[in-house]
Structure formats: structure tokens, C-alpha cells
Amino acid sequence: MGKINKSITELVGKTPLLELTNYEAKENIPAELIVKVEYFNPNQSVKDRIALAMIEDAEKRGLLRPGVTIVDTTSGNTGIGLAAIAAAKGYPFRVYIQDQVSEERFKSIHAFGAETIKLSDDPGVKKILDETGGDFVAAIRYLENEVFADNPDVVFVNQIGNPANPNIHYLTTGPEIWEDTEGKVDIFVSAVGTGGTISGTGKFLKEKNPDIQIIGVEPGPDSLPSEEHPQPEHEITGVHPFSEKIPREMIPPTLDQNIYDEIIDVEALDAYEVVRKIAKTDGILLGESSGAAIYAATQVARRPENKGKRIVVIAADSGLRYLSTALFGE
């Protein structure tokens, strides 16, 4: 029986799992490395899931109506997903975006008719970032409390504080992994940005099997701003520290800090190398955070106790978003 979809909202989720068989063989990896290929979402990233969930949640709560502008902050992918869903539903969209994201991300958001504002271009945000050493969470709280508060013509969906973010992964990403593996999954690995993916997916998987190990990935010290290097040469876009490296108040509320069993640091150059290898071994083009998660999963797979186990990794987006960056530009 045929099926014709009527909106991109019907295309979100149900992304495939792919075992990296050629990469496993070339790298002599003694476990199964399986990626959930999130670039099969209509706008090529895992963030399509939360974009749809947050907008539809705001509609259900009566916050969105014709003419109301949707607003959020982003490192790129959430902004693209929100811009696309907003366009499909007929809402204006404005996004405050991190300065260093790739040219492809700016152009994608503009293509959907949305407005982009660099964080450094807003004096209040810039002041907060300068005073806090780049605390993205503090900047978002400023926008929420000082800029968008009590404005009925704006809905700030706030991906780092919106329960719809982890909840959609609990309702979709986790069940998809469980169903497609027939419940045969030993370890789940995800890079952490807002924390929604690992929190919602991890919660679902742990409820199904408490023995499943949940591993979160954060940037290594050389890939983070510091006093000596306020702008590191290489970063992992959209992936943020969440361990003892940063104060607790800088951790997004959407991250459940009780859900993961281990944290692994990954440097940007290691993530880049994995992405380049997999493009040549398995023919898939992935982004920086995917490389970080697969690099961490590779290290976990080499542990003697994990021989023969099945490791599922979130491959968050497509490498096509990074063609102009150092990921493929060197």
C-alpha cells in the first residue's frame, strides 16, 4: 500500500542503525560498533526530533498562534531543525547562534526564511559571555529572563531547559534502538550538548535493561577554551563539557546527571580523524560530534571485558554541514 506524506513533520525519526563493518575490520575492533544514522531525518540531524517536539508542545500548551515568533539559541543543528519545522507550520523563527558555527549552518537557516543573530552581536549576551568566560547557559538565562520574558509575541522554546527535549528521545530514540536491536544492546554512547539525547534515550534503555552501560562524551581539555587559549584551534561543534570541569550551574537542566555510567573525553583532532576514516571505509559522511562519539566507542570496544559486545552510538548529523571547516578542509 502506497503512502504519500503531507509534511516534513511526518518524516522525523525512525532513523536506521548501521554496523560499521569495514571500520571494525580495518581497525581490528573486537566488538560491534553500530551507529544510529540521524542524518536520515529530513534536515539531516538528531535535532529534528526536539525541534518538532518543542514546537508541538508549545502548540498544545496554547503558546503558539499565527504571527507568534519562535526563538531559540543554537550551535546550528537545532536552529536548522526549528527553522524548517517553523516554515512548514507557518511560524516566523529567529535564532541566536554561536559565532563559530560553519557557513553551511548559517545558510541553511536563512534558506528557510529565518533570522540569525550571532551571540556576539547582542550587547547583553556578549557582556554575559565575557563576564562568565563563555558560559552559554548563563547567556541563555539572560535571554529568557531579560529579553523574552513577558513578551506574548515570542515563544522561547529553550532547548537546554525544555523537558520536551529529553522526553522525545525517551519516546522515540530509545524505543527505536531497542526495537531494531531486538533488545540486544550492551553499551550506548552519545556526545553531550544539551544532554537531551543521552538523558531520554538512556532512561528508556535503562528501564528496559539496567545493565546497559550509558557513556557520555565531552570535549577534551585541548578542545575547550582556556585562559591560555580562549579560542582553541579545533573544537567539536555542539558538544559541551558536563563533568567536574565546569560548575554545576553551567550544566543544562535537560541533562540527567544520574543516567550515565561513564564520561569519556575526546579531543577534536581525534574526532576528525575518525570521521575521515569512516568516510573512506564505510561510505558515510558524518559530523564532528559523531566522530567524537565513535572515537569514544572505539576505545570502549577495545577493553577486554567488552569483546563481542554490541555498542550503539548516536551519529548526530551529516558531514555535509562541515565541508567548509577544518573537519574536511585540511
Image: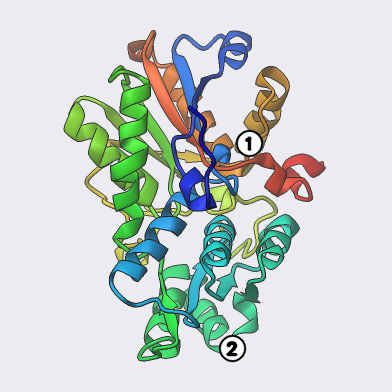
Q: What residue sits 59% from the left and 69% below the top?
A: 97
Residue placed under numbered mark 1 in the picture: 286
Q: Where in the figure is residue 56, as x and y percent of width and height?
A: 37, 62
Quadrant of the rendering where the C terminus is positioned: top right
Direction from residue 323 to residue 205 in the image, left or right: left
Q: Secondary structure at mark 1?
A: loop
CA gap between label 2 and label 1 equals 35 Å
Residue located farthest toward the right when viewing the structure as drawn: 330
Q: Where in the figure is residue 70, as x and y percent of width and height?
A: 48, 75
Residue placed under numbered mark 2 in the picture: 123
Q: Secondary structure at mark 2?
A: helix
Taking 238 as reference, is 44 above or below it? above
Q: What residue sits 71% from the left and 47% below the top?
A: 322
Direction from residue 164 to residue 291 in the image, left or right: right
Residue located farthest toward the front when viewing the structure as drawn: 1
Q: What residue sits 66% from the left and 28% below the top?
A: 284
Evaluate whether residue 243 shows in this view. Answer: no
Q: Nearer the viewer, residue 221 or 50?
A: 50
Q: Where in the figure is residue 82, as x and y percent of width and height?
A: 52, 62
Evaluate whether residue 96 shows in this view. Answer: yes
Circle 2: residue type: Pro
Taking 123 as reference, is 99 above or below it? above
Taking 279 as reference, is 71 above or below it? below
- Closer to the eye: label 2 or 1: 1
